[in-house]
Amino acid sequence: MILETERLIIRPITPDDKNEVFEYRSDRETNKYQGWIPATVSDVETFIGRVSKQINEPETWFQFVIIKKETKKIVGDLGIHFFGSENKQAEIGCTLNKDFQNKGYATESVKRVIDYLFKDLNKHRIITSIDPENINSIRLVERIGFRKEAHFVESLLINKKWVDDLMYALIEKDWEELNL
Ligand SMILES: CC(C)(COP(=O)(O)OP(=O)(O)OC[C@H]1O[C@@H](n2cnc3c(N)ncnc32)[C@H](O)[C@@H]1OP(=O)(O)O)[C@@H](O)C(=O)NCCC(=O)NCCS
């Protein structure tokens, strides 16, 4: 499954992407709100080996990389967690190399993936979980039209610390209205 936007190609991650992905995923400062920070390229290789080979498989994560058309360079990645087959819900998460942040690439790719999830995979609801201190992520999902549904207190153990968790969601009906 390959998706395209004006400036980007969004395609499944492959083992050959491991070095480029390690370059930005290992950046501890940029990724301080993330649960997974690889220590070695081999950690990324293991991660790529574990994600689903097929999109829309129940109870799996599928991983896209986001590529800038102009340079063919990976600018970030986007993961989708597919829940049970009858569930029609998915969770998404996006990470950009800090050199490619603040250019609208995350907004452009997340919108394209959401459109695909609702229109092609017939999903009903898309959620995303965000640390309340992760301002850039909050701005991203609010810009796209996600609704803040919950603020859980110290509900996640990330990097050995209990942190709060915001739950944002978008339902298919919202997406239709936003794009009328
Ligand atoms: C979350 C994350 C992907 C958001 O990235 P981002 O660069 O802020 O988002 P975008 O790529 O959509 O860029 C949007 C910004 O670019 C600006 N911009 C500049 N040129 C632009 C253009 N040509 N088109 C659109 N927007 C443009 C927008 O105005 C916006 O800035 P603003 O928020 O000040 O208004 C990024 O902060 C990140 O990777 N963080 C670390 C990983 C993480 O914590 N992920 C979340 C957990 S899943």
Image (cartoon, helix red, strand yellow):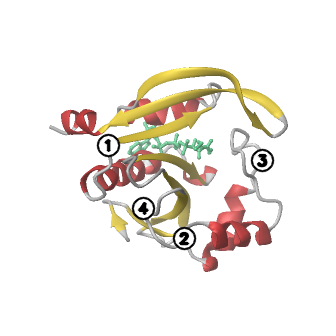
* Residue at 58% over, 50% down: 95
Query: Which amino acid type is shown beneath numbered disc 3?
Result: Arg
The residue tagged with tag 2: helix, strand or loop? loop
Closer to the N terminus: mark 2 or mark 1? Answer: 2
Q: Nearer the viewer, mark 4 or mark 3?
A: 4
Could you say where residue 74 lies in the image, as x and y percent from the top left? Answer: 55, 66
Q: Quadrant of residue 17?
A: bottom right
* Residue at 36% over, 35% down: 170
How busy is the neighbourhood of tag 1: few (under 14 within 10 Å), some, or many (20 plus)? some
Query: Which amino acid type is shown beneath numbered disc 4?
Result: Asn
Q: Residue furthest bottom?
A: 16
How busy is the neighbourhood of tag 4: few (under 14 within 10 Å), some, or many (20 plus)? many
* Residue at 33% over, 64% down: 4
- Residue 103 appears in the rendering: no
Residue for badge 3: 28
Residue for badge 2: 13
Closer to the N terminus: mark 2 or mark 4? Answer: 2
Q: Nearer the viewer, mark 2 or mark 4?
A: 4
Residue for badge 1: 124
161 left or right, relative to 111: right
The residue tagged with tag 3: helix, strand or loop? loop
